[in-house]
Amino acid sequence: MAARRTNSAMMETLRREALNLAGRAIEQDNSGNFEVAKRHYQEVVRLLGLIIERMGSQPSERNIIINKREEYVRRIEQLDSSILFSKAQAILKKAKSEEEQFKFVQALNSYLEAVEPLLQAQKHANDSLKAELRIQIKQTLDKAEPLKKLRFPPRPRNGLTPSSKLSPLTDTERKILLDTSRINEKIFLPWYDDDDLNEPFLFDKLFTDLDGPLQLSLQQKELFGSWKRPYQVMKNPVMIAEISSSNIVQDIVTDCSFVASLCVSAAYERRHNKQLITKCIYPQDEHGKPMYNPFVDDLLPVSRDGTLMCTFSTNKDELWPSIVEKAYLKLMGGYDFPGSNSGIDLYALTEWLPEHIFITEAFDKESTWKRLFRGQKDGNVLVIISTGEMDEERANTVGLVPTHAYAVL
């Protein structure tokens, strides 16, 4: 009797989970988020398989569930075609951009690369999509054909001649950069524009960082539930919804100087309409705007109650503060970050040179204020103020937290 009750409770739990996930899968499917929808459908298929295994002699209900499971399997196959088609469109967009920049060799390779997913997509496509795929394949090959005949180097852009560009690094200089690439027991290779700006971001499966998860802080460990990807905790994740300093929340990681640096950088972009922090996020579209791409290591620490345990945006579907923080803290050794100072953090994020001004008896507040005010107004200065040690009474009087960093917006 007890075993029967246990099985009944298990079946009810499985049904509830399958129904909930099926609803989310259909919602994502209708929104065009095919990758997320596919993963939800796959989990539903797995759960329905467990339900079928545990069902007794109930042929009518069993057949209904089997048919429903097969329906979801067919939809997964159809989504594979849609995902491959979307992948091909992204490659074609890249090829077009390369051709416009006179990068004809890269453009030819990209056009030919796009043909493969288009061919694969025909396998489970419906008739209308198959017809569209055949047209797309022919058009892609037609675009590639004239590029095969070109035999001249790409033209320089914007009137630049090769001699006006920076000299390439020597082998000795490259070796120095490589030799100094180990930081906190991890390798951070130098950035080379020719290679890294052409980094492909279209992977067949979700990318997981080979260095493994970041070390958590003690406070995070106490509350830790699991590492989750954005689609598991957000409805429609995007890299950037709105660049705003007021959206950024620090949470429990002790990196106030870094978060303050994010805030002043975001405020600068919003005020002056110039990229500062977002220009270091890749991949980017043709306008230099970072795109959310689910094929990066976007695993984030989540507590047992399902909340993010890292810096996050009050816009619940926005990722950039969490992703940029994770990248920086990987460099600094992990989420168990002991703290830094905003000069170091701002330089790492923006390459702007830091200057520390200490408030001492010799401090000229009037001239310093005018200098900072004018510099911030003109877009030449980012300002962060840090407090020192204070007793509780003093902290309450001035309304500030001891040894904390504040963004001046």
Image (spheres, helix red, strand yellow):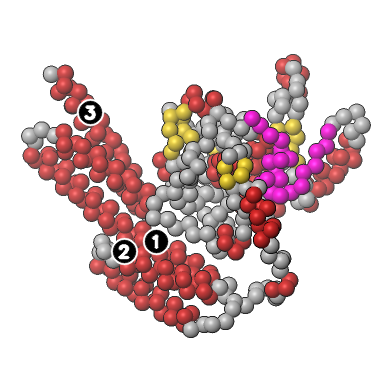
Give the amino acid type for the residue marked by disc 1 in the picture. Answer: Ser
Give the amino acid type for the residue marked by disc 3 in the picture. Answer: Met
Q: Which residue is mark 3?
A: 10
The residue range painted magenta reads: 338-358
Left or right, 407 with respect to 307, comes to right
Please tell me whether residue 84 is drawn above or below residue 54 in the rendered image: below
Residue at the location (50% across, 42% down)? 211
Circle 1: element type: helix
Left or right, 217 with respect to 39, comes to right
Q: Position of residue 177 (x, y in %)?
A: 66, 52
Please tell me whether residue 258 is drawn above or below residue 194 in the rendered image: above
| Residue 12 seen by the camera | yes
Q: Assess disc 1: are there few (<14), some (14-19) or many (≥20) residues with their C-alpha within 10 Å of its C-alpha.
A: some
Left or right, 195 with respect to 204, comes to right
Q: Distance from label 2 to label 3 (Cα)?
A: 38 Å
* Magenta highlight on residue 88: no
| Residue 305 seen by the camera | no
Please tell me whether residue 366 is drawn above or below residue 34 in the rendered image: above
Mark carried by residue 86: 1
Q: Position of residue 345 (x, y in %)?
A: 68, 41
Q: Assess disc 3: are there few (<14), some (14-19) or many (≥20) residues with their C-alpha within 10 Å of its C-alpha.
A: some
* Magenta highlight on residue 347: yes
Q: Assess disc 2: are there few (<14), some (14-19) or many (≥20) residues with their C-alpha within 10 Å of its C-alpha.
A: many
Give the amino acid type for the residue marked by disc 2 in the picture. Answer: Ala
Q: Which residue is mark 2?
A: 121
